[in-house]
Structure formats: C-alpha cells, structure tokens
Image (cartoon, grey):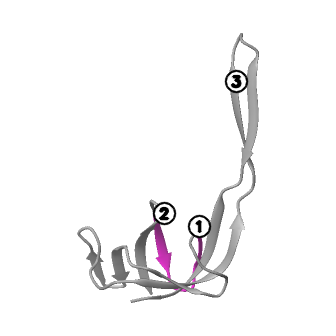
Amino acid sequence: MKIAVIKTGGKQYTVAEKTRLKVEKLPGAEGQKVEFDEVLLVADGETVTVGAPTVSGAKVIGTIVKQARAPKIDVVKYKAKIRYHKKTGHRQRYTEVTVDSIA
C-alpha cells in the first residue's frame, strides 16, 4: 500500500490510495480529476523516498467528490469598558477529494 505526503493550500496531508480528504478550495467541478504535484514523501512498504523539498516525478491523482462549505464559526470582537462588541460569522469553502493513485 502506497502512502504519500502532499502539500496543498499551505497545509500538508498524509494520503493513501482510496482515501477521502478535505482540502482548501480547488478549482474544478465534481467528477473532475485533480493532480497534486507537490509530493514531499512517498512510501510503498519497504522503500521510503523523501524529497528535498519535493520528490521529482511523483504525483498524486484524485477525483473531486464535492465542493462545499464547512460549518459556520462565530467570530466575536469585544473591548471592555467602551461598549464595543461585534459578532460575525464565517464559513470556509473546501473541496473533498478521493485519492485514486500515487505515481
């Protein structure tokens, strides 16, 4: 079973084939293929290849399952003694991807 560490959206994710992961929003529609070129590590049982900073020629291919928004978080600003408070909300957009292959 191959395992890889990829970098997308400023974050690093450990992925294996046939796994689902939520990443920062990527362009594309549901059902489209997406390719991750920034592969930092590839392991397949007995051999481990570590990139400096990336593994050359390695890529992870996946399929976009859905484009969605995360649950709402509340953002509250408050300053004591001056009667100031402000409440807003935020819903982060994300893309859910199924990993098809690690090459």
What label does residue 40 carry, if any? none
Which residue sits at x=71%, y=33%? 76
> Measured along the vertical axis of the image, is residue 39 above or below residue 71?
below
Residue wearing tag 2: 9
**Residue 74 sits in quarter:** top right
Distance in Å between CA atoms under marks 3 and 2: 31 Å
Q: Is residue 13 magenta?
A: yes
Q: Nearer the viewer, residue 6 or 31?
A: 31
Which residue sits at x=60%, y=87%? 32
Residue 94: x and y, percent?
63, 65
Q: Nearer the viewer, residue 12 or 64?
A: 64
Q: Secondary structure at mark 1?
A: loop
Q: Secondary structure at mark 2?
A: loop
Residue wearing tag 1: 25
- Assess disc 2: are there few (<14), some (14-19) or many (≥20) residues with their C-alpha within 10 Å of its C-alpha: few
Instruction: Give whichever of discs 1 and 2 has the lower sequence position.
Output: 2
Residue at the limit of the structure toward the left, as seen here: 52
Quarter placement of the C terminus: bottom left
Residue wearing tag 3: 78
Residue 73: x and y, percent?
72, 47
Instruction: Give whichever of discs 3 and 2 has the lower sequence position.
Output: 2
- Assess disc 1: are there few (<14), some (14-19) or many (≥20) residues with their C-alpha within 10 Å of its C-alpha: some
| Span colored in magenta | 12-24
Name the kind of residue labelled 1 in the image. Answer: Lys
Residue 41: x and y, percent?
34, 74
Name the kind of residue labelled 2 in the image. Answer: Gly
Residue 15 appears left or right of 25: left
Quarter placement of the N terminus: bottom left
